[in-house]
Amino acid sequence: IDPRMNVKFDIGQNHKFNSISALNIYDRVSEDRRIDFENDSNYVLDDRQDTSRFNTFLNRTILTAKYGKRWKAEYGIETQYETGSGDRIVDSSSTPINRTEMTTVAGWAGAQWMPNDRLTIQPGVRIGYNSRFQHPVLPSVKAVYRGDKNLILRAGYARGFRSPDLKEQYF
């Protein structure tokens, strides 16, 4: 099940709001079977069945703004909450131990400066918190130079981070 909702609207002439919320419900059902060809039997092995459930809620909200002819900015916040349960999940820090959860909250800001018609510079930074992994500060900077119609130079630097979701951690 993957319902989601997106809300977009303009705030005056220079600001735009965009927010998306999504819910993902994932059930994994597995069983081990033994097939005996000599006796022509087929049965489920005891203690070898598992049903795991993972739920994820995500919200990402972005505000973009235009400040005059040369400046633009983007501000955002993202929250994600995951839960997991099942016999294959063993989390000694939770009660009961076959349930687990993870929370991620992050915010970012970026700017776009166009000092002239040929050059665009975009610095940005993202900071965050993750309940299981250390979330580093993530800086970025990009630049684009537009020469004549046959020349566009691009350069960029960025750091990245993505923690594994609960499904990746327990399968």
Image (cartoon, helix red, strand yellow):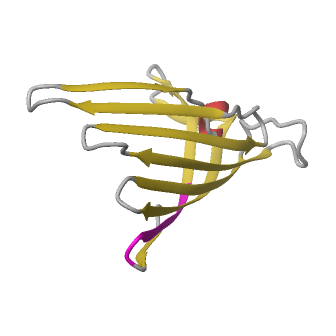
2 or 70, nearer to the observer = 70
Dominant SS type (magenta): strand
- Taking the magenta stretch, the answer to whether it contains residue 8 is no
Query: Where are the magenta residues, as a range?
Result: 13-25
Q: Can you give x and y, in whole percent of width and height, for residue 162 in the image?
A: 59, 33
Residue at horizontal 76 percent and vertical 32 percent from the top: 134
Q: Residue furthest left?
A: 149
Q: Residue furthest front?
A: 116
Q: Can you give x and y, in whole percent of width and height, for residue 110 in the image?
A: 52, 47
Residue at horizontal 68 percent and vertical 42 percent from the top: 127
Residue at horizontal 11 percent and vertical 30 percent from the top: 148
Residue 31, quarter of picture: top right
Q: Can you give x and y, in whole percent of width and height, for residue 145 in the image?
A: 28, 31
Report if residue 162 is visible in the image: no
- In the figure, is residue 69 to the left or right of 166? left
Q: Can you give x and y, in whole percent of width and height, for residue 120 in the image?
A: 35, 39
- Taking the magenta stretch, the answer to whether it contains residue 23 is yes
Residue 113, quarter of picture: top left
100 or 57, nearer to the observer = 57
- In the figure, is residue 166 to the left or right of 32? right
- In the figure, is residue 46 to the left or right of 13? right
Against 86, residue 158 (above or below) is above
Against 41, residue 12 (above or below) is below
Residue at horizontal 78 percent and vertical 45 percent from the top: 100
Quadrant housing the C terminus: top right
